[in-house]
Image (cartoon, rainbow, N blue to C red):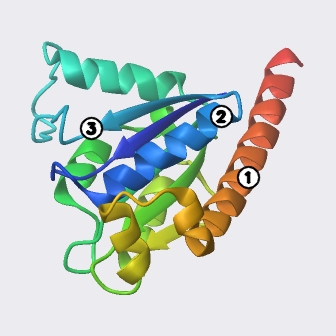
Amino acid sequence: MNIVIIAGSNRKDSTSTRLAEYMGRLIRQQGHQAALFDLHVSPLPFYSPDESYVEHATLQQFKKAMLEADAVILSTPEYHGGMSGVLKNALDHLGQDHFSGKVVLSMSSAGGAVGVSSLQQMQAIVRNLHGINCPDWISIGGSQRRSFESGQDEYERPEIDDRLHRVLASFLNLARLVRGQSNHSKAV
């Protein structure tokens, strides 16, 4: 499968981006493709419905990658009880054709214990874009967040890595099922 991971931070050493990178490595280890779209490295223009952005090469690459994705992972820091502005801006550039019938996993990194508000916001947007929310989500905070900041290896943080592996397996299984049904319905 082809998974697109959107790292929705505008910070160089963001823990939500490190989490996204880590999940990408795990996906590739399982034989799937994982493309990371890092909004800090590849910023997008501010969305305006009055603009077409056809000449913005990064935005066109982003949209193409999203159209070709079999499933999507959204990763954001939680700021003031919500997702990052750069992730919201990126999602505003997309439409139902980018999400319809695709499984989406939401992840957050919070300064406190967990970042549930940003996860709920992402899931509401995914529903409105006709995507399929993975029933699991991931939020790291507190000591779990610090383990990603310090660059600890997975064997040094077994309590979070067990959960990451379980959630990733659930996400990939659901995406595989949905993709199989989608391919079956196209053949009929």
Look at label 3 and name its amino acid. His
The quarter of the rendered structure image containing the C terminus is top right
Q: Choose between 74 and 63: the one closer to the eye.
A: 74
How busy is the neighbourhood of tag 3: few (under 14 within 10 Å), some, or many (20 plus)?
Answer: some
Q: Which mark is residue 127?
A: none
Query: Which is more foreground, mark 3 or mark 2?
Result: 2
Q: Secondary structure at mark 3?
A: loop
Q: Secondary structure at mark 1?
A: helix
Q: Is residue 93 above or below residue 88?
A: above
Cα–Cα span, label 1 and label 3: 29 Å
Q: Are marks 1 and 3 in contact (CB under 8 Å)?
A: no
Q: Choose between 154 and 42: the one closer to the eye.
A: 154
Q: Residue at x 42, y 43 (%)?
A: 21
Cα–Cα span, label 3 and label 2: 31 Å
Quadrant in the picture for residue 187: top right
Q: Badge 2 is on which residue?
A: 29
Q: Choose between 137 and 143: the one closer to the eye.
A: 143
Q: Choose between 110 and 184: the one closer to the eye.
A: 110
Most extreme residue toward the bottom is 113
Q: Badge 3 is on which residue?
A: 93
Label 3 vs 2, first from the N-terminus: 2
Label 1 vs 2, first from the N-terminus: 2
Look at label 2 and name its amino acid. Gln
Label 1 vs 3, first from the N-terminus: 3
Percent of width and height locating residue 67? 48, 25
